Amino acid sequence: MNSQTSSLEFSHFPVMLSEIIQISNPKKGGLFVDCTFGGGGYSKALLQFQNTKVIAIDRDSNVISIANKFKKKFKNRFQFHQLRFSQMETVLKKENVDTIILDLGLSSIQLNNLDRGFSFKSKKNLDMTMGLTDKSARYVINNLPESQLMSIIRILGEEKDAKKIVRNIIKARVEKEITRVDELVKIIEKSKKKNFSTKINPSTKTFQALRIFVNKETTELINGIIKASQLLKPGGKILIVSFHSIEDKIIKYFFKNFSKNRSKPSRYLPEVQSDNFCLFENYSRKALKPSKSEIKKNNPSRSAKLRYATRSHKQFIFPNDLIKKFNKYLDIEAINV
């Protein structure tokens, strides 16, 4: 362990940290890419082991001050780049990458800052931008036509009451621009029947949909995992923590259909390539979930799922199948705003 980390304390709970460390095995050293730096939880833990180097990436400018503290402490063992993780090849082209880690959830820095507009508790601006983003949720809600808002909330949010929610949004914005989080929350609550059998906030799915759309999260995930599989060295590992069903569906499909131990080749793959088109030696068939003790300490971790795979020695071939399979999400995120 390295005592350098003692002064780097943040009110941040890296999700499933013990599992990440166990699977990535930093005791052996190597180059680790933390694609969602956030509060620095994974990077901090990895740098406690000798002979590790971390290249951290995050699109959020609010984490730069934290990254600068890491640079000061760890010198040439730590780099930080403000990028979308789908752009990782711009800083990893000449690197021999052992492990790539992605935590797809909101960081505590983002969620706890009410000015960012991610929390239902906020009465501030309806923003939801993670950084390097063109338009805010406020712009989307007030400017997109009804049909496009319907697609966003119904498909990206998997919200069964999307039609009623969108109609009430349209009615409200005709009278007055919807500018604050609490204004949107009231519209959603008015649109949904009370369900006393669940503790899930009625705004959860609509907020999820808007956040995904604003930040192009599905496009980012698909492009990011393709780039990661291209950049990992043979035997290198990719670990991904997801928080909702769309993310997990994409990750599971990618690992399952492009791994040596898949149950059967994808029907979309050309027959000639199916036996050789193995980007991964193996993958975790069953997602790992947080322990009860972790959930007790950090309740937002309750919906987390961790999946991982090991890069094969096969030459990289672009997985067009992945794009075809989830094209409906990509098409929605490509809506011009």
Image (cartoon, helix red, strand yellow):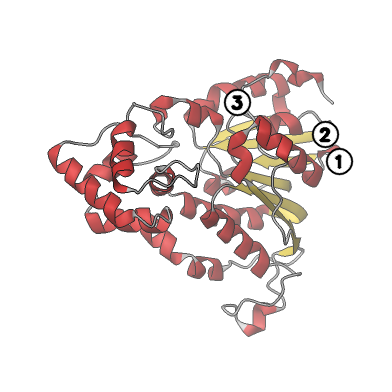
Give the numbered dot on residue 51: 2
Three-letter amino acid code at the position of disc 2: Asn
| Residue 123: quarter of image | top left
Is residue 333 something that shows in the picture?
Answer: yes
Residue 17: where, in percent of width, then height?
72, 37
Q: Which residue is at the front of the view, 196 or 30?
A: 196
Which residue was labeled with disc 3? 67
Give left or right: position of 87 versus 185. right
Q: Determine the residue positioned at 33% across, 37% down.
A: 185
Asked if residue 183 is positioned above or below residue 168 in the image, the reply reads above
Instruction: Point out the tag, 3 or 1, that comes first from the N-terminus.
Output: 1
Q: Determine the residue positioned at 63% across, 53% down.
A: 228
Residue 42: where, in percent of width, then height?
69, 34
- For mark 1, give the secondary structure: helix
Label count reads 3
Residue 189: where, in percent of width, then height?
33, 42
